[in-house]
Amino acid sequence: MDYLATLSPLSIPFYVIGASGDHRLAVAALQRGARDYFALPDDLGLLRRSLERQRTESRGRRAAERFAEDERESSGFGAIIGRSVALRQVIEQARRVAQHRDVTVLIGGETGTGKELLARALHYHSPRAAAPFVEINCAAIPANLLESELFGHERGAFTGAVAAKPGLLELAHGGTVFLDEIGNLPLELQPKLLRALETREIRRVGGQSSRKVDVRIIGASHVDLPAAIARGEFREDLFYRLNVVALLLPPLRAREGDVELLAETFITRLAAQYGLPPALLDLETRSRLRAHPWPGNVRELRNVIERALVLSTPGHLELEDLGASRVIPESGGELPFPAPLRTITQAAVERMLRLAHGNKSEAARRLGISRPRLQRIIDGLGEDE
């Protein structure tokens, strides 16, 4: 009754021996790749439980593979719309990088250029595609909570930590962590992230031991990180560890021909979403779309098209509703002058926040400063340098 069996369709080899069988044969089978062996009839219950566990794991793997395939179609490189040379060069670089499962990537580009979409494409075209893709916006989570979100915490690590909680780096094991707006990562957390990148180990808040993690890190920032390093707001060693491969997404104004292609795509998708007939772009509308500088890039274009479709007569895209030809002025009146530098700085920040509709990251980008520095000015700490 000694034989090596392969459980089809799972292709999981196991070795079955009789109660009086030679266990040396089973050891040899394990060395040849069998996962386990069972002595029948004594181990019949163990065998049944093992087969059920293998079936469950196999179903989970197949489900993950199907999900990854669906995401590859909806969030892969094919979902990045554009035919311009500037964009296709970046996509070709990204395709080459994606196949290497451990290469760290840093994506740069202005707000609204599609950094998250590119990060998802990198993941779902990589050997890690069947594992989780976990995104965290470093600018959207308060600094006192961000460490726990990234690294997890043990029970009792701080007030309110009533149970242990794994961090996102643990939950993404085998997959990819996308750290959006990494330029806003608090300075005190940067050494801990650097250590995780170098050792592939993390330690939960309040924990005493390290845990292995297997993730690819993709960072993204619209902040000029070298300038942030010069201001002492970002660690140079972390920058070089992240900047193994740098991908810079071009702004929409530098993507010749892509504005009209994107506009047509958004019209088709949004018209279907709202149950409206598709609208045609006439020559005057196309001209205005091309002339607009699109400071908000692809995100701004999509919002403009959506607003125009909703407000226009069905089947038309009326110019007065498009709003694309109106460039937002960079000032809403004169700044106080003469005045102390701190007063002028605060007034400039307040004015830019209004222009950016309260979006602090966008206001910081337009002012050419980091978001932490913007926040310090808002808090009244001042920036006199």
Image (spheres, rainbow, N blue to C red):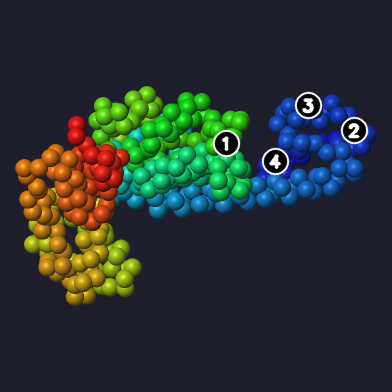
Measure the alpha-carbon separation of dots 1 and 4: 40 Å
Report which quarter residue 284 is drawn in: bottom left
- On residue 206, the disc is 1
**Which residue does the image show at 12% across and 66% down from the upper left?**
319
Indicate the secondary structure of the residue bearing disc 4. Answer: strand
Please name the residue that numbered disc 2 is placed on: 21
Q: Nearer the viewer, mark 1 or mark 2?
A: 1
Mark 2 nearby-residue class (10 Å; few <14, some 14–19, many ≥20)? some
Percent coordinates x, y for residue 361 in the rendering: 28, 46
Measure the alpha-carbon separation of dots 2 and 4: 21 Å
In front here: 179 or 304?
179
Q: Quadrant of the N terminus?
A: top right
Q: Nearer the viewer, mark 3 or mark 1?
A: 1
State left or right for residue 74 relative to residue 30.
left
Indicate which disc, 3 or 2, sits on the residue closer to the N terminus: 2
Indicate the secondary structure of the residue bearing disc 3. Answer: helix
Please name the residue that numbered disc 3 is placed on: 28
Indicate which disc, 3 or 1, sits on the residue closer to the N terminus: 3
Indicate the secondary structure of the residue bearing disc 1. Answer: loop
Measure the alpha-carbon separation of dots 3 and 1: 45 Å
Mark 3 nearby-residue class (10 Å; few <14, some 14–19, many ≥20)? few
User: Hey, what amino acid is under mark 3?
Assistant: Ala
Indicate which disc, 1 or 2, sits on the residue closer to the N terminus: 2
Please name the residue that numbered disc 4 is placed on: 12
**Which residue does the image show at 54% across and 30% down from the upper left?**
201
